[in-house]
Amino acid sequence: MMIYKYNGCGNDFILLDYDGVTDYSQLAIQLCGKENFDTDGLIAVKTEPLEMIYYNKDGSRAPMCGNGIRCFSRYVRDQGIIQASQFDVHTLAGIIKVEILNQDPFYCEAMIGSPDYSTDKLAVEQEEPIIDQELTIHQKGIKITSLFMGTIHTVVFVEDALAELTRDVGEQICHHPLFKEKTNVNFVQVLNNEELIVRTYERGVGWTLACGTGCCAAYVVAKDHGYLSEPKATVHLELGDLIISGEKQIKMKGPAVREWSREWEEN
């Protein structure tokens, strides 16, 4: 089979055509592991209707991936599957509308959808929304806010987001008993009323260079907390920036890069 590697702001994926037969969960574990290509996830591209089937590197299925959908969008243009500049992509999180804004360098906008604070979407056993709720991690209280933004996300505001990369707080929150299906954890540093720095510990992956839906979640929570003055923000990641905007419907703009393609022989 032919496999392709793409990245969105450093968040990297193996892409390939869906065949209806392959066990993509096991293939994700195999291809995305350190012994092979060490990527964050695997995306199977299904047509009729156009659908993004996404697996984390540990083989777990995720409803959506923000950087992944931009890579998906570039792939379907590169492969000639889609000719139009605007199209719909089916995901487990619903239909995502995509608009290609520039082909070279590739840049697109995706309508990620509406944030949802309801706890049933978070798979937690409480009725009250998780807004500034305190968790005890290493005998220290940490305020978290959780919401569904394409997938399950938790936002933590910190003074230095980069410093969290050397700590295990992200892992501890991700695996906390509160979250029955785990959670992505986004450490958010507010630079000013139009800019954020975000670093994400991704469930099923660990620390990642970028998380598109995580940036959307960070934007929503920062806006709801009054930290942003405009319905648009630049989110700084390790290898690039995303532009997040919107009120009820959240939109994400960003790049996608094709790295390579090669033949893969299954063992």
Image (cartoon, helix red, strand yellow):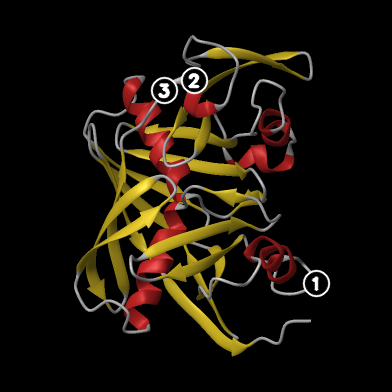
Residue tagged by mark 3? 117
How many marks overall?
Answer: 3
Q: Are marks 2 and 3 in contact (CB under 8 Å)?
A: yes
Label 2, label 3: how far apart the Cα atoms are: 6 Å
Among the two numbered marks 3 and 1 on one chain, the one whose residue lies closer to the N terminus: 1
Residue at mark 1: 35
In this view, the residue farthest toward the top is: 128
Q: What kind of element bears circle 3?
A: loop
In 3D space, how far apart are the residues under numbered discs 3 and 1 (Cα atoms)?
Answer: 38 Å
Q: Are marks 3 and 1 in contact (CB under 8 Å)?
A: no
Q: Does label 2 or label 1 sit earlier along the sequence?
A: 1
Rendered view: 17 above or below 62: below
Give me the residue at 59% from left, 57% from top. 55
What kind of residue is marked 1?
A: Glu
257 sits to left or right of 231: right
The quadrant in which the C terminus is found is: bottom right
Q: Nearer the viewer, mark 2 or mark 1?
A: 2
Residue pointed to by mark 2: 119
Q: Would you call the spot at circle 1 few (<14 residues within 10 Å), some (14-19), or many (20 or more)?
A: few
Q: Secondary structure at mark 1?
A: loop
Question: Which one is closest to the eye, mark 3 or mark 1?
Answer: 3
Q: Is residue 228 above or below residue 91?
A: above
Q: Residue at x 48, y 51 (%)?
A: 237
Residue extending farthest front:
21
Give the quadrant of residue 186.
Answer: top right
Q: Are marks 2 and 1 in contact (CB under 8 Å)?
A: no
